[in-house]
Image (cartoon, helix red, strand yellow):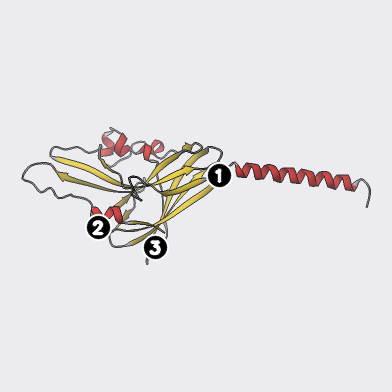
Amino acid sequence: METWIIPLLTAIGGAIVALIGRELIEWSKRPRFEIDFEEREGQKPYIPDYNDEGIRSAGDTYRVKYLRLIVRNKGKKPAMNCEAKLELVIEGASDATHKVALHWSRRDPRLYSTSGDVELGVIDEPEKVFAPINLNINDEETVDILTLPYSFSTVADTDHSPRFPPHIETVSLRQLVLQPKNTYHCKVTVYSSNTTPESFKFKVNWDGTLEGFNKAFIKD
């Protein structure tokens, strides 16, 4: 072997080791997602139940229940341009997987918009509602997955039983509905422009009652 080859191989080997070392350091510092059901007050999943500010009428109260997931960045860099998408499959059905984009809770027009279009069920600025967010180090955000809107009368001498649709709705621009007494397999994946995607899977089996919404979800 020529004497000049050994220093050349040593230099190449050193460069490769240095490159791998830098890649490993960058990999260890990347954003890293942890996804789970939201948990509060000893409840997991915690089901928020809010006034629906987009709908108002005399003698009626309008509310909406939510299933949310909480997304945490446990890495060493902010996660940039984070988006969430839902894949849904009906157990026992031969249909293809349904996929929809979700929005982060902070952008919910149903709760935080005064636009009349929300009352009509129309999202007037989807590019804002479904816009990505950045997630700082050790920060967390919730993403809305499913809702059950309902209402009841506050007028005396009327039926105060809650009124709600016969299905659960996805919080998405192209809305999907989940019927009671069916089992749905859901996968929510969070994407970012500077880290690998992370997914969370759960099942939905709703008995069709308002109270049953709180018990319809289990980690898959």
Q: Amino acid at mark 2?
A: Gly
- Camera sees residue 167: no
Mark 3 falls on what kind of element?
loop
How far apart marks 2 and 1 lie (CA) works out to 39 Å
Percent across and percent down for residue 67 are 34, 48
Q: Residue at x 21, y 42 (%)?
A: 62
Between the residue at mark 2 and the residue at mark 3, the CA separation in whole angstroms equals 23 Å
Residue picked out by circle 2: 208
Picture disc at residue 151: none
Q: Which mark is residue 95?
A: 3
Q: Secondary structure at mark 1?
A: strand
Q: Residues within 10 Å of mark 2 (few under 14, many from 20)?
A: some
Between residue 90 and residue 41, name the one nearer to us: 41
**Residue at point 32%, 45% (across, down):** 41
The residue where tag 1 is placed is 195
Q: Position of residue 190 (x, y in %)?
A: 47, 47
Name the one closer to the observer, 47 or 204: 47
Q: Going from the N terminus, do you reach mark 2 or mark 3 first?
A: 3
- For badge 1, the amino acid type reads Thr
Residue at the farthest left position? 157
Looking at the image, tell me whether mark 1 or mark 3 is earlier in sequence order: 3
